[in-house]
Image (tube, rainbow, N blue to C red):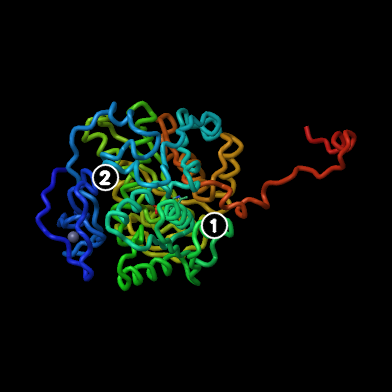
Amino acid sequence: MSTVVAEQATPTPTNPPALREGAFGNATGLACRECGHQIALGPHYACPECFGPLEIAYDFPAITREQIEAGPANIWRYKALLPVPDDIEQSPNMEPGYTRLLRANNLGRELGIDNLWVKDDSTNPTNSFKDRVVACALSAATEFHSKVFACPSTGNLANAVAAAGARAGIKTVVFIPSNLEQAKQVNSAVYTDSLVAVNGNYDDVNRLASEIAGEEDGWAFVNVNVRPYYAEGSKTLGYEIAEQLGWRLPDQIVIPVASGSQLTKVHKAFQELIKLGLVEDKPYKVYGAQATGCSPVSAAFRDGHDVIRPVKPDTIAKSLAIGNPADGIYVLDICRETGGAVADISDDEVRDAIVLLARTEGIFTETAGGTTVGVLKKLVETGQLDTSLETVVINTGHGLKTLDAISDRVGAVATISPSYDAFVAANIV
Ligand SMILES: *Cc1c(COP(=O)(O)O)cnc(C)c1O
Ligand SMILES: [Zn+2]
């Protein structure tokens, strides 16, 4: 992974201040995922040669388990593996990560899986895994002296950006589709006075953000122009799962797919741990989960296609509703190469899975987690998942954000007058 950065970044019109020594830790440059071309670290996301996506390249020193274990109980315990400075803990941040890996015996019994774990990322500071990626993007935005911290979002990202920006004292502007769940709107607006609702779907919002990023100086759009830094934050999910399993990789992992960034980065994390000798090399299968109403990657997997045909999303799993997923083709590659799969389920199955996870494990997930658990169930039913192998399913967000999805399914079993007789008459137990 050692790299030499020869090229200079394309100069930006405003001549930004020089980067601080060590501002990006062990990162050495930006490398194109398509053609391998390398440029210097900067607020860039597309390859100047072929427009392919840029990814962080590193030159890692030797890193031991003990060094990591001595770190804080948040994502910064892995700071040597991230594009962040060594003093990152000193900057005001949300300290996300190191969430629970829960053994899920009840859900496992229900689904017929012998050895099942839930990685519960709903307990992050703003209740979704997005706090991880935003923490890395914020560090980059700070090092680039950005004036505005912004994002186009399907909901959770806006929550995480607005909160992290508030804590860091940097102006935030967050853009969402106007039809977003009320809870996700309030969970952003409480942290920022600049929540912008756009009449359009996420892909429209994303296009608008790219346009603004091109026109305005000093804006860090976490998932657009600082996307390479943002994306690295998802690796910490992979590191944590391996560390919490006692420094080993699971046999199978099921991950929700919106843009596909999280899935590709969990795989990248596992590969890095193997290369660094922190876990034993072994095969593992990666599975992607989508809701049928927005399943362009699952459709391509099923039809054996190498390209993703964009769709117009129509699903209650709004946090996964990206019709034109930037990393979709890489998700296809990884799921095919590892022997996994990408599958999708209906909105009704998403609702069922939310209740199933709640009633078996006491975990209230949002529609994205319902999608992931429901796809896990489907993969068992279709024989695509080996029930004898150790399996991890990721819950990426909290159910309190998508109450509407199940509020007509669960509720009081009876409404009675406050008397013992009325209780007995209701025949509840
Ligand atoms: C954003 C999001 C995802 C998927 O993220 P990608 O990296 O874009 O695939 C999954 N779950 C939740 C709850 C999210 O908010
Ligand atoms: Zn390229």
Location of residue 152 with respect to 25 vertically, above or below: below
The residue indicated by pointer 2 is 85
Q: Is residue 18 left or right of residue 361?
A: left
Q: Which residue lies at the image location 49% right of the left edge and 50% below the top edge?
A: 368
Residue 329 seen in the figure: no
Q: Amino acid at mark 2?
A: Pro
Location of residue 234 with respect to 360 vertically, above or below: below
| Residue 190, numbered circle | 1
Q: Look at the numbered disc 2 and give the secondary structure of its residue.
A: loop
Mark 1: few, some, or many residues within 10 Å (few <14, many ≥20)? Answer: few
Q: Is residue 307 left or right of residue 276?
A: right
Q: Which residue lies at the image location 24% right of the left edge and 34% below the top edge?
A: 274
Query: 101 or 65: nearer the eye?
Result: 65
x%, y% of residue 185?
54, 60
| Residue 305, numbered circle | none
Q: Quadrant of residue 51?
A: bottom left
Upstream in sequence: badge 1 or badge 2: 2
Q: Is residue 9 left or right of residue 405?
A: left
Q: CA distance from mark 1 to mark 2?
A: 30 Å
Q: Amino acid at mark 1?
A: Val
